[in-house]
Amino acid sequence: MQNKWVAWGAVLAMLSVGIGAFGAHMLKSVISEDYLKVYETGVQYHMVHALALILLGLAAGQWGESMRLRWAGRLIAAGIILFSGSLYVLSTSGIKILGAITPLGGVCFIAGWIFFAAEAFSRKSA
């Protein structure tokens, strides 16, 4: 589990950099400033949560595997897809209904952090 989450976090972080660079260089003159801000929000949350997956993998290495950490990783990864993905598509296509998907990704992020916190609180301090 540890290696899997660290690896996925690194891949998703790399994608966040690439997607962010694409937006900064290719979309700046193509989409409105408002949609560019929406796009950038997706990139920011994408990167933060990719780093969260790396942190989760490192925590699993320290604490051992657990169902809570597994669910935290799954939910955070789903959050990246739903939250950031919907913002990317919304900002580049203008299809506003996709904005309805974004909060589902936010709920996944929150739930993932809750599982991560629950696991941390369940650990006995050294």
Image (cartoon, rainbow, N blue to C red):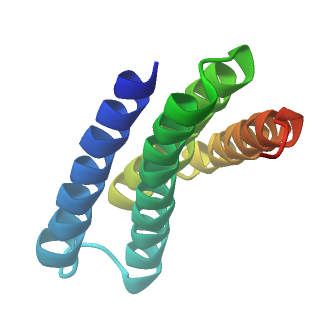
> Which residue is depicted at the point 56% across and 39% down?
59
Quadrant of residue 39 in the image?
Answer: bottom left
* Left or right, residue 54 beside residue 76: left
> Which residue is depicted at the point 12% across and 76% down?
25
Quadrant of residue 67 in the image?
Answer: top right
Say which of 94 and 125 sits in front: 125
Inspect this view and state whether residue 123 appears: yes
Say which of 47 and 6 sits in front: 6
Instruction: Name the spot of residue 82 as percent of width and height, x first.
Output: 54, 38
Instruction: Name the spot of residue 15 as percent of width and height, x first.
Output: 24, 48
* Left or right, residue 125 beside residue 24: right
Instruction: Name the spot of residue 10 as percent of width and height, x first.
Output: 28, 44
Quadrant of residue 121 in the image?
Answer: top right
Say which of 33 and 17 sits in front: 17
* Left or right, residue 123 beside residue 105: right
> Which residue is depicted at the point 18% across and 81% down?
29
- Residue 119 position (above or below residue 100): above
Residue at the limit of the structure toward the front, as seen here: 126
Inspect this view and state whether residue 95 appears: no
Instruction: Name the spot of residue 108 as percent of width and height, x first.
Output: 69, 37
> Which residue is depicted at the point 37% across and 41% down?
9
